[in-house]
Image (cartoon, rainbow, N blue to C red):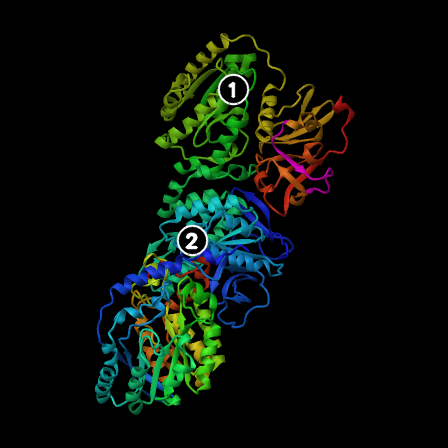
């Protein structure tokens, strides 16, 4: 057997959606929609062969070719000779083991795939199959019918966790329009269009992206279905270029009841949030309750609870409604709140912080307003919150507010629509509600709030804001958002240059330590900063050597990576055993995937550490 | 080595259990089930034949602990333990039926003796009875077709048969099913290897006896495209051995079989009639005029038999029958139905998707 690395490499990762490409090949990156015709299963120039290994020969399932093959063809899907029914488990396993025994005796050096049935085969067989480095797993879903997709989704999720992220999953037979986006979102890389014909045979039409019964003739339905399956897939491809695929999934659920059922029943907690990109910019539209479980929402909440440290010096939090303008502090409403704060607190204004109540994110501290997706979402404003929305968002808000020190007073000044949420929070958190009615910025409400703020300010000890207090708090929050709650920066003698919302550069003892792009909510570290705080970051990659070459870091050189790294995170690159820092870069794929892929780029290096400047050490 | 076949005995245990149960339903009787078919004699000569299921005790192989072939339901047609006297009465009973039918149809010039087992097995049909039966038919037919398993194709049984029949009149049909030993061993539980078949064919040919090979289309655990390909390969291997007839037998769901169990649990679907048609066409083109190719799908268009969309099934059934009786390709070369587009895709994808023929596809 020839050792061959899986042919795909991850070009882009966002959750289970991965763009898999083949280095040096003209074949376009995944996702792929194979065309199934009487000529076989094809994608442009790529043709999928189906073969099995007989006792002494390789048999192609090409009905026009009678002779055995001399070698395994490129892009073959290798199957066992027989497919015993699931009730004969031992025979089933025997067939797969026999296939592997025979494959071991053959020399091959080509991209190939295996058939694998996640419902009937044990993980032990999968592990054996992985030793052969397949590029594709074609999923056999023998006993599934069209009404039992949910268990399939669970199996796909499980399988995705067991196999390398640069192995493609192919679901033969495809799925109907509307479902394709969900399957791709969960990690299926290849589908085919044969579903057009099978659905037509059953009298189902995909016209207008809806799955409906039709009286049209089968041959007419096939054409209609084919065109909509193609278009649906093209829309998925274009969504992947510029937007978030989950948005398309949510859109599809509103035109397809079975997709809606699946989304409602799907266990979103099974998604590995560390695989979702954090450097996105596209706007997110959170329309229905399903967005409460959107991966970006979950990721925001998870990271906030794990990484956000309540800033020192703050004695009051003012909970207010979110604004449609992002970041919130640029909105008229938030500027009004801020001016009332300034008026009441004057020099002590930095002891109070505005936090925004919002759905589906729950609650946003002001320091995190510019991160994704807080800076990029939109919701319909009806004033009415569903019961689920209230429960989910207030649960997160309570958990976040529990991190607030006991001596910090929490005020709430909101519109009537937030009443249920505020009541829910009040069950566990002590809130001082100044207004919860219509027009929270009407003259009456403003006056009530100003009085309340004045009372708070008067009862507070004198407080002198240090220069750039807010910026420093925000900078720390954003650094910790990326590098973890333990990440600390020496703040002594730091200087800010520039003006928000433009890029800010931060200097310390004449050396640039970081730059800060607030519109993206991202901070870029420079080695001088990183030298002083390097061991505390949870965003690290370890190499097997002690030299960093080139501007791209490839998986072959990586021995280990922190699984806290999301695609788009800044990473600190170390030598073996994390003895010596070598550079700083941006993760192209998650730490989870870095530990599991066999080839391809994993990070872009933007700064290399050559020597430690004396003044930094001093 | 990862694979250990000795651990995989559940299938034969299951077939054995099912066989015991189906044998319990067998009733003692002397009835000879019979039906008439169009028949092609070769060299353009057409006529008709009478198939007769002789009430022997049926296949001995099926009585073994492993239960015999996974698809075969034939023994249930036969008595379980007929007396010696009952067996002795078979020749006279059979000739009486045949002569009656021949009076109605003078074209009736061939007889097919089926025993739900092996005609050449003396355990089923003692040599004397066999000879008596053949002796009665030799003068009134042009062709006698008998069926047997390979292991009974031995010189002794051949000679005792040829003592009473001219080899030119005799056709020995062997249910080899497939020349792929793996399918025969692990799916069909056939107990025949291709080597045994080759030996049997060579031996029969050495006595100038014509051999017909049975090709089983779509055994259990085999996908549609695999079945398609296997039928072609099997037919080619048989053709290369010099058989004079190839009978394509698409699977149907026989009662009390493992195939029925799998069908009921959703793990087996009989072949498409398109596969039957396409395989028949390709085999006939491959073997030409030299070899007679027949297929007469049992239960065609029914739920338990080979089927298409439901609209074209009867057309397929009739035309395949006509082709078998005439060997005229016109009957099977111009059939159209829009379910072909579905079938084509099914053929390409089903092996990947399920491997044994289930897509829960039902035509609207």
Residue at the spot of label 1: A353
Q: Between residue B301 and residue B20, name the one nearer to us.
A: B20
Quarter of the image that includes the C terminus of chain A: top right
Q: Between residue A450 and residue A275, name the one nearer to us.
A: A275
Q: Between residue A495 and residue A600, name the one nearer to us.
A: A600
Query: B362 above or below B168?
Result: above
Say whether residue B355 is magenta: no
Quarter of the image that includes the N terminus of chain A: bottom right
Q: A413 left or right of B37? A: right
Look at the magenta stretch and give its main secondary structure: loop
Say whether residue A545 is magenta: yes
Query: A380 above or below A342?
Result: below
Chain-order first, disc 2 or disc 1: 2
Residue B50 % position (x, y)? 28, 82
Q: Quadrant of residue B170?
A: bottom left
Q: Chain of mark 1?
A: A
Marks 2/1: CA–CA distance? 62 Å
Residue at the spot of label 2: A89
Counting every numbered tag in the picture gives 2
Residue B228 % position (x, y)? 44, 69
What element does badge 1 sit on? strand
Tell me, yes or no, if residue B207 can be seen here. yes
The residues colored magenta run A536-552
What element does badge 2 sit on? helix
């Amino acid at each position: 057997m020839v050792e061959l690395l899986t042919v795909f490499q991850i070009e882009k990762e966002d959750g289970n959606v991965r763009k898999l490409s083949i280095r040096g090949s003209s074949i376009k990156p995944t996702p792929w929609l194979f065309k199934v015709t009487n000529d076989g299963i094809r994608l442009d120039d790529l043709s999928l062969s189906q073969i099995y290994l007989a006792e002494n020969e390789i048999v192609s399932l090409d009905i026009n070719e009678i002779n055995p093959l001399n070698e395994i063809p490129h892009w073959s899907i290798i199957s066992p000779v027989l497919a015993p029914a699931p009730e004969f488990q031992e025979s089933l396993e025997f067939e797969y083991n026999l296939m592997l025994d025979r494959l071991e005796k053959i020399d091959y050096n080509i991209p190939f795939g295996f058939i694998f049935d996640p419902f009937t085969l044990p993980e032990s067989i999968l592990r054996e199959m992985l030793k052969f480095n397949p590029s594709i797993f074609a999923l056999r879903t023998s006993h599934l019918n069209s009404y039992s997709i949910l268990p399939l989704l669970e199996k796909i999720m499980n399988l995705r966790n067991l196999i390398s992220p640069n192995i493609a999953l192919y679901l033969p037979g495809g799925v109907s329009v509307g479902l394709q986006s969900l399957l791709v979102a969960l990690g299926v890389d290849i589908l085919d269009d044969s579903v057009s014909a099978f659905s037509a045979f059953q009298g189902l039409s995909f016209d207008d992206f809806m799955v409906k019964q039709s009286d049209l003739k089968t041959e007419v339905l096939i054409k209609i279905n084919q065109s909509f399956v193609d278009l649906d897939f093209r829309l998925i491809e274009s969504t992947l270029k510029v937007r978030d695929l989950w948005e398309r999934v949510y859109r599809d659920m509103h035109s397809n009841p079975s997709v809606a059922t699946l989304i409602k029943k799907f266990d979103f907690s099974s998604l590995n949030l560390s695989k979702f990109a954090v450097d996105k910019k596209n706007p997110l539209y959170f329309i229905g309750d399903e967005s409460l479980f959107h991966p970006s929402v979950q990721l925001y909440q998870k990271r906030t609870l794990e990484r956000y440290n309540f800033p020192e010096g703050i004695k009051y939090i003012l909970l207010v409604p979110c604004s449609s303008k992002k970041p919130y502090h640029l909105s008229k409403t938030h500027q009004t709140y801020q001016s009332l704060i300034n008026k009441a607190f004057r020099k002590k204004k930095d002891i109070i912080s505005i936090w925004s109540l919002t759905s589906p994110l729950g609650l946003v501290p002001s320091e995190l307003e510019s991160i994704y997706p807080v800076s990029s979402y939109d919701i319909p404003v009806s004033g009415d919150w569903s019961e689920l929305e209230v429960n989910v968002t207030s649960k997160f808000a309570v958990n976040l507010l529990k991190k607030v020190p006991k001596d910090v007073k929490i005020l709430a000044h909101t519109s009537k629509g937030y009443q249920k949420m505020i009541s829910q929070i009040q069950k566990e958190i002590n809130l001082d509600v100044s207004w919860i009615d219509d027009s929270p910025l009407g003259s009456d409400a403003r006056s009530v709030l100003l009085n309340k703020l004045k009372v708070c300010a008067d009862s507070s000890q004198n407080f002198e804001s240090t220069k750039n207090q807010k910026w420093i708090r925000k900078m720390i929050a954003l650094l910790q958002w990326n590098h973890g709650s333990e990440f600390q920066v020496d703040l002594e003698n730091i200087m800010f240059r520039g003006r928000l919302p433009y890029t800010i550069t931060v200097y310390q003892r004449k050396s640039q330590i970081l730059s800060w792009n607030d519109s993206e909510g991202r901070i870029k570290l420079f080695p001088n900063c990183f030298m002083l705080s390097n061991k505390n970051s949870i965003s690290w990659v370890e190499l097997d050597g002690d030299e960093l070459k080139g501007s791209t870091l490839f998986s072959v050189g990586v021995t280990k990576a922190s699984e806290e790294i999301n695609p788009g995170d800044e990473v600190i690159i170390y030598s073996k055993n994390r003895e010596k820092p070598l550079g700083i870069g941006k993760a192209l794929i998650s730490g989870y995937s870095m530990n599991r892929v066999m080839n391809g780029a994993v990070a872009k290096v933007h700064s290399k550490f050559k020597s430690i400047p004396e003044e930094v050490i001093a | 080595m990862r694979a250990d076949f000795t651990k995989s005995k559940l299938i034969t245990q299951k077939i054995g259990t099912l066989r015991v149960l189906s044998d319990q339903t067998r009733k003692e009787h002397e009835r000879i089930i019979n039906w008439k078919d169009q028949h092609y004699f070769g060299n353009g000569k057409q006529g008709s034949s009478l198939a007769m299921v002789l009430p022997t005790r049926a296949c001995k192989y099926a009585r073994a602990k492993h239960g015999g072939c996974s698809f075969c339901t034939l023994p249930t047609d036969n008595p379980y333990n007929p007396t010696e006297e009952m067996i002795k009465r078979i020749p006279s009973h059979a000739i009486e039926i045949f002569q009656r039918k021949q009076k109605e149809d003078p074209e009736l010039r061939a007889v097919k003796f089926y025993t739900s087992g092996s005609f050449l097995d003396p355990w089923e049909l003692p040599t004397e009875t066999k000879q008596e039966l053949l002796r009665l038919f030799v003068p009134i037919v042009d062709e006698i077709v008998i069926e047997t398993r390979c292991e009974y194709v031995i010189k002794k049984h051949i000679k005792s048969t040829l003592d009473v029949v001219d080899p030119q009149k005799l056709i020995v049909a062997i249910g080899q099913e497939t020349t792929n030993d793996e399918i025969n061993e692990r799916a069909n539980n056939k107990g025949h290897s291709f080597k045994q078949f080759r030996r049997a064919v060579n031996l029969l040919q050495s006595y100038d006896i014509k051999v017909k090979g049975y090709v089983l289309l779509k055994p259990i655990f085999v996908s549609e495209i695999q079945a398609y390909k296997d039928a072609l390969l099997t037919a080619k291997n048989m053709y290369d051995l010099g058989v004079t007839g190839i009978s394509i037998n698409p699977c149907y769901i026989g009662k009390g079989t493992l195939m029925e169990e799998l069908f009921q649990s959703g793990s087996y679907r009989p072949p498409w009639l398109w596969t039957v048609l396409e395989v028949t066409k390709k085999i006939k083109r491959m073997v030409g005029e030299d070899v007679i190719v027949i297929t007469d799908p049992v239960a065609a268009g029914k739920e338990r038999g080979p089927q298409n969309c439901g609209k074209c099934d009867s057309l397929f059934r009739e035309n395949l029958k006509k082709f078998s009786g005439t060997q005229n390709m016109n009957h099977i070369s111009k059939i159209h139905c829009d379910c072909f587009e579905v079938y084509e895709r099914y053929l390409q994808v089903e092996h990947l998707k399920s491997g044994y023929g289930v897509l829960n596809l039902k035509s609207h």
